[in-house]
Amino acid sequence: MPTDDEFADAFTDGFARALRGAAELAPEPVRHTLAAQAEQRGRRRRRRRRAVVASALAVLVLAGAGGFTALGGRPLGPTGPAAQPDPDRPEMSTRDFVTLITGLLPKGTVQELNTDGPEKLSGHTTGATLLFDDGAGASIVEFSVERTNLRPDAGAVCTDGFQTPQDACDRTVRPDGSVLVIDKLRNQNAKDGREWRVTWAAPDGRRVSFTEYNGQPATANRPEPPVADSTRLTELVTDPAWDRVFAALAPVKDAPRPGDSPPPAPAAGGPSNAELLAKLVPLLPAGAEVEKQDPGHAALTVTYQGRTSMLQVGADPASERGRDELATMDRNPPTPLEVRQKGADGTLVVTNRFGNGKSATNPVLHWTAAVHYPDGSQLWLSEWNGENQYTARPGDPALDVDQLKAIATAPAWRS
């Protein structure tokens, strides 16, 4: 079951940009394969790091700082595990890399936000965060160039609009088998904020990503990000100039090859969303009305005694990871409104209420109940007031945590 932090991630998709203690809460859900799941979790970690860069920049701008160096976040140059030097691999300096990406941007001025990386590219991935000003408002932009072991269907995916505010997402399979995604997201924590992400993923695992804001992540200063034309965005991430960068990056193990057959679909890891909803509905309290169901997210809208909320259910099959999580849960202190109850057979039932974060309680926005079984399987319910996972509102939910607990512990789930 997701932790409290992950619940907060899923429901708020926040882009908080405070200099200290910043935490961007923006998950990206399953869209295609298990590889995509892992990839999207990595993106979330990278966005958290990027939030620190953006926050530091905002503070410097407010303070009237004249330069931008060593602000943290993604370093310029290689990231990830260091690769063994290859004398046959072409070299590329970080200065050449910055010159290359500056040349790909439209006419304007560029300031580097990270200039403390290694002198030469060497790992599997590299990137840079810049402040780009085309005369219509300085904006943060970020480039990432990677060699991955992901096929295009996992390397370039749309964000789920159920969990993240989204204006549009266009996903195109190109004639060469590569995939292009242009994902236009909204920032609900910054008035009129926009974050546009463009990703190109090749059949051999190469990937170029470009992210741009309409200003700084916490403060919009223009209607749209600086590179607004879809054709121009496509050209930006598919330009042949990236070949030089890829040549300088180390290859990765198990990289796909063009023409490879798709991997077999992963075996089902538990009941389908439709099956979960079919079991959930009869367990609702007498008098509860289900207004609509969303099988894609195992969620439904329920009204009970005049109150309406969204209710989501999830289940994980028995696993070593689940057993480890249960065994180590006692090491982590409960959050302020969390209640844990362990049965004689070792089953742990956890209920919780929280706001926009692990320890936030004012206002309470999320109500959860989870059951951790000794074999590592898990069943969890989550409830909030809103039409999707980023519009949680305060107020009494349709079902209280005791009712959620009664549903989660019903024997029907084990049958």
Image (cartoon, rainbow, N blue to C red):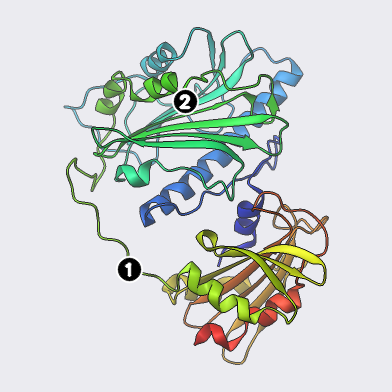
Residue 336 seen in this snapshot: no
Q: Position of residue 51 (x, y in %)?
A: 61, 36
Q: Is residue 278 left or right of residue 237?
A: right
- The amino acid pointed to by label 2 is Ala
Q: Nearer the viewer, mark 1 or mark 2?
A: 1
Q: Position of residue 67 (x, y in %)?
A: 62, 14
Q: Position of residue 317 (x, y in %)?
A: 45, 75
Question: Is residue 303 or residue 276 the one in the foreground?
Answer: 303
Question: Is residue 37 or residue 165 the one in the foreground?
Answer: 165
Q: Residue at x 66, y 30 (%)?
A: 193
Q: Position of residue 228 (x, y in %)?
A: 52, 20
Q: Which mark is residue 128?
A: 2
Q: Are marks 1 and 2 in contact (CB under 8 Å)?
A: no
Q: Quadrant of residue 298?
A: bottom right
- The amino acid pointed to by label 1 is Ala
Q: Is residue 265 left or right of residue 39?
A: left
Q: Residue at x 39, y 24 (%)?
A: 234
Q: Which mark is residue 267?
A: 1
Q: Residue at x 51, y 72 (%)?
A: 315
Question: Is residue 18 or residue 79 the one in the foreground?
Answer: 18
Q: Residue at x 63, y 88 (%)?
A: 343
Question: Is residue 25 or residue 225 the one in the foreground?
Answer: 225
Label 1 Cα crowd, 10 Å radius (few <14 / some 14-19 / many 20+): few
Q: Secondary structure at mark 1?
A: loop
Q: Quadrant of residue 379?
A: bottom right
Establish if 15 lies above or below 36.
above
Residue 390 seen in this snapshot: yes
Establish if 22 lies above or below 8.
above
